[in-house]
Image (cartoon, grey):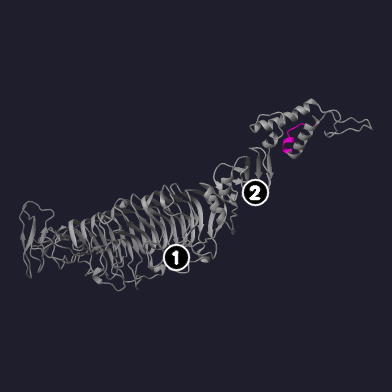
Amino acid sequence: MLKRLIVLLVLLLTFPQFALALGRVDTEGATVDNKFTEGNQALAEPATVLGAAWLNDIQEELVGIVEASGQTPAKGSQGQLKKALVLKVDTIASLRGVIGTETGQAVQVMEDGRGGLFKWEASDHSADVAADLLGGIYVPPDSVPTGVSGAWVRKWNGPADFRWYGAKGDGVTDDTAAIRSALDNHTVLTGAGVFLLVPTVPANFILPLTHSVQILGHKALTFKIASGSGSFKAIIGNTSSVDLSGLLIDGVIFDNNAALNAPPNLTDLQTYPRISVYAQTGSNMVVKNCLFKNDISINTVSLNGAAVSNCRITDNDFVNICVGSETLLNDHSTIYTNGHNMVIAGNTFEGASWSAVTAIETHGGLSVVTGNTIVRYQAGMNLTGITHLATELTVIADNVMDICIAGIKIWSYKYAAHTTGYGIENMLVTNNTIRVLQVTSGTTTVGAMIGIVVEGNSDMPIKGLRIIDNSVEFEREDTVPAYTGNNYSMGIGAYTGVAGFALVDCEIIGNTVKNAPVAGIRFSGCPVTNLTIKENRIHNAGQGMAVVTAAFKLPIFLTPTDITGFILIERNHIIDDFAVTRAAAAMYLSCSAAGKNIEVRENRITVTGDKVAFVRPYLAPSSPATYPVIQGDIVDKFLAPLYTFRAGSYVKDLTTQKTWNLHADGTTWLPSWVSSTIPTSAYGIIGSYARNPAPVVGSPKGWYLTTSAAVDVWTSEGNL
């Protein structure tokens, strides 16, 4: 009994936290401060009496600890209390020095970052230990380091921590091996700190994923490329050989440290693209709430492959980004996707001194690109078709772009087996705001400055392209050229002449185009089937002062190679407020034998200053036998066109309040207006008509000019 009591007392002294719950001894022989004494026979002082109540208290306290651990107290056992209590050690290295004796025995490791609760499992863990050499989860004792006789096993709920594997997160220590080990052994991970990564083989991933993972960074976890460490393929991800379905990168900071680890040249960068997140196979992959900064790369986030679908890239910030080459606007983009049902939304892009190339490039359909803000890039978006299925039903909406060359480029092209059908089908581009800021950016380019334009080398037809309610604005040129001269600079349109390309069922509606250097809206060089240009506001088109072909400087410029169905130009508002016009005219319509299918009606042309050339509303159709028709257009001052239009055309002149009607001969424009009295004029146009607005009984309904002379002869239409 005494031996057992001594053991219990030793345990209580070892684990004093449990003694605090016991009452102090107060039986006969105890000291005044409730401590034990051994007595003194020489002085006849008795030892402290062990009362039953006190011993029962000890027994129940200790048995309660054993039972609370899930064990049943057993006589003869001397390890139950040890198993129930948690030993504390300072480090993982110290844990390796502890030999477990009972399965379930617990040890609390106090090491910063690597700490946690470990329990002994007395079974063969050699395979686990071999896969976890850094001891993030499985820690064998030093006496049997293989783990064949047992190991300490971490117990936890929630994500694993990169620091469990020895990662320091101090921004100084190379954490690459530790991060790799953590990724190999877990599917959900987190951590806090700046984890330094050192690429070793330029053609490889720094953190190759062998399976899908979820990394929860909470904006406190940074992966940073070490200074002067050289080139690499990508930070995290893998090639098409690994299915990364369900991949989640959330709240992680990626710092490419480009200022201290720049690629030596463009060739090296194209070989080793320095992508941050890269996947080629998988569905339901998500990259969100991340910060990508200090980046020189071909792409930053690339989800690219025929087996990629249902992915989301949302609410990320891309800061101080330099992408690719200044001359390659395609393939070099911050976000690059090739897949089906992709969403790119709510991201912000900040280029480094206008040297970033393209913010977003997409290949694929059932996709949405919305709510993104792009600043200081050469180009905003490159929207590309590859396969028939992957080009349908794409929505580009509510994005804001401050760029220096190109807002939205649409590229429909043949690729691999995709040689028939449409390259892009049913794409909606709506409510985007684009500012082309070549002056502000201080850049120059030999290429065209564009707002929303179909790429010139497109070679597959586009069907159902709808460009609606967008705003495209260029900087105004008042005294000196601001934009590099290029005939194909424009606000909205297409200028491809490649065989095989055509536009089918397209609508350009409700857009605002301001200060386009050359054309406001232009469609040239391709056949067109059913094109609607309606309710657009075109302000100061053709304003560019650089040298271009003067005849191309037009608010609306149409030179299709063929027309099937119709072209409708309706209720557009064309404005020019320069003192001297720079545009050639309000519209240019050059058409094939199908030009008779062009209808122009109810457009408004508003001009100020001396605009003699500008107020000719329309220039030449290519064949006088195929006239377009003009009905109800409104101009400030009418000047009869030099070219022939279809009989039945008419234009309203706001200055004189006259309506000019085209005679059946197709060449003579006859004015008509309202007059309560017979007109007086000299050398008028025979056939002119003045309508009496309020005739009374016996008075004329109106008057026709029948003889043009020094005093014109007007003939009554007939009395009421």
Q: CA distance from mark 1 to mark 2?
A: 41 Å
Residue 292 in the image: x percent, y percent? 48, 57
Q: Residue at x 57, y 45 (%)?
A: 128
Q: Amino acid at mark 1?
A: Leu
Dot 2 alpha-carbon crowd within 10 angstroms: few under 14, some 14 to 19, many 20 or more: many
Tag nearer the camera, 1 or 2: 2
Left/right of residue 90 with respect to residue 281 in the rendered view: right
Residue 308: within the magenta? no
* Residue that label 1 marks: 269
Q: Which residues are magenta?
A: 16-24
* Residue that label 2 marks: 92
In the rendered image, the residue lying farthest to the right is 42
Q: Are marks 1 and 2 in contact (CB under 8 Å)?
A: no
Above or below 97: residue 70: above
Above or below 20: residue 500: below
Question: On the rendered image, what quadrant is the N terminus found in?
Answer: top right
Above or below 598: residue 7: above
